[in-house]
Amino acid sequence: MMEVKKDTILVASVKRRKKQTNKEGKTIMSSSDALAKSFSVSHSGIFGVDEKSMLEILVKWQPEQLSTFRNETSRIFLKDERFPFEKCEEFLLKFLKREFKRFKDAVVQWTMHPWERDARMARKALKRGRQAYGLLIELACTRSSDELLGARRAYQSLYSESIEEDVASRVDGIERQLLVALVSSYRYDGSKTNDQAIKLDTQKLEKAISIGDKKQLIKDEEIVRILTTRSKIHLIAVIKCYQETFNKNIIEDLDEESSLKDTIYCLCVPSQYFSKILDSAMKANANKNEKEALTRVIDVVVQWTMHPWERDARMARKALDGRPQAYGLLIELACTRSSDELLGARKAYQSLYVESIEEDIASRVEGIERQLLVALVSTYRYEGSRINDVAVRSEAIKLGITINRHGDKKKLFKDEEIVRILATRSKPHLKAVFKCYKETFNKNIEEV
């Protein structure tokens, strides 16, 4: 009886929404209202679900719609007392798992906050033991530093212990050192790399692999240090340098060490890793773990199938929602895309959110980064190879004078000359300017 009561609460919570009307005053059924209708009570009084209708709605929802749904259904999703995410009530999990058959895992994971979803998957992997350690590697290596930190916070809130101590206490094999280090990591997410460090790490990896016991490589301190602390862009460069220097693939050198292979795939080429997961799950003789893994890659598949313009527009919106710690993502989107790709993302942003990304940044960003961010996303750079040597030298000197003049380096974000140069000049031109800066002032501009 109590169970039916809770199911009734679920329906009431979803249905209790403010009705929307169009210009003619007619009621519009929102996606949330439609979702409410997918819950129904049969003539026998037993609570049930219209699986087809619910799935048709959920698969079309984007992260921001799911976030709104979680916030509006406060009887189902509770605000965590310590961290900024909505926590799923246990009875909802039991209800969905009972009512749904083939799609239960997908539905649960779609509706749940990403932090909680990852935390629960990590707990499940730890309970399953050695055969599920690959899932822990996937969660630690395919998420951004902030996403992994969020999952660690959710884990503490849900289970009253840290994921680090849980991994350390539950994992008995040689994988413990690697797994604890991976889930504890907060990697640098920027684009800066150090060529000397890349070469040094490459040499250390080759030495450890060539002289070490192939069955004990997962415990090698240098291998663990490099894979668990270095940025993803640094590791991609290291793997490339390894291939060029020693004329062999590091994956092949690792032989049968599957955990280290999965770690490298997830960090450096996640698309190949998820392709492997999909291939395994779609086999006729796929085992239970392989079939369950399919639901984990739904978000990735959605990202792959989404048009790159729309994907970048949604990522930009997500970055603005996560301000100011996510402003680095805006800079990445603006600076790593071609001019046409950035223009496409700006058009997609307008179409999705009925406002330009420029005005959204200008209205949301209150700090000193505003001027630079608006300029970066507004630009349409020249993409040819032509460089004006006179302009290069002139701007290198201007940068040096401007940087030296400012006592407070934080105010450099607002300097008109710096913003103009960084936001309007072509990438080959900027590379030449930075090189000239180093030659002229005998120091890297990044160090300043």
Image (cartoon, helix red, strand yellow):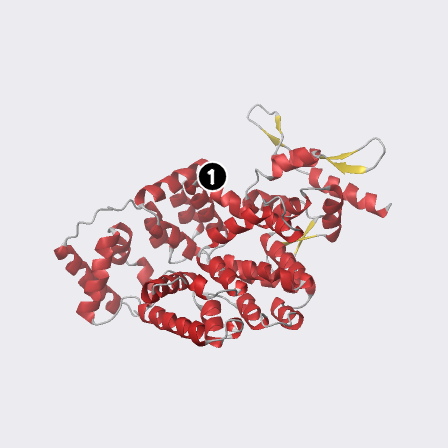
Mark 1, residues whose alpha carbon is within 10 Å: few (<14), some, or many (≥20)?
few
Quadrant (top left/top right/bottom left/bottom right) for the C terminus:
bottom left
Closest to the observer, 235 or 60: 235
Query: Residue, x 73% and y 53% (percent of image)?
Result: 90
Location of residue 400 by image quarter: bottom left
Q: Left or right? Give the position of 381 relative to 275.
A: left
Location of residue 445 by image quarter: bottom left
Position in image of residue 77 (x %, y %): 68, 50
Which amino acid is tagged 1?
A: Tyr
Position in image of residue 36 (x %, y %): 69, 36
The residue carrying mark 1 is 353
Query: Residue, x 57% and y 49% (percent of image)?
Result: 280
Residue with the most extreme left position: 390
Position in image of residue 10 (x %, y %): 74, 43
Instruction: Evaluate whether residue 201 shows in this view.
Output: yes
Closest to the observer, 325 or 175: 175
Position in image of residue 307 (x %, y %): 44, 39
Closest to the observer, 176 or 260: 260
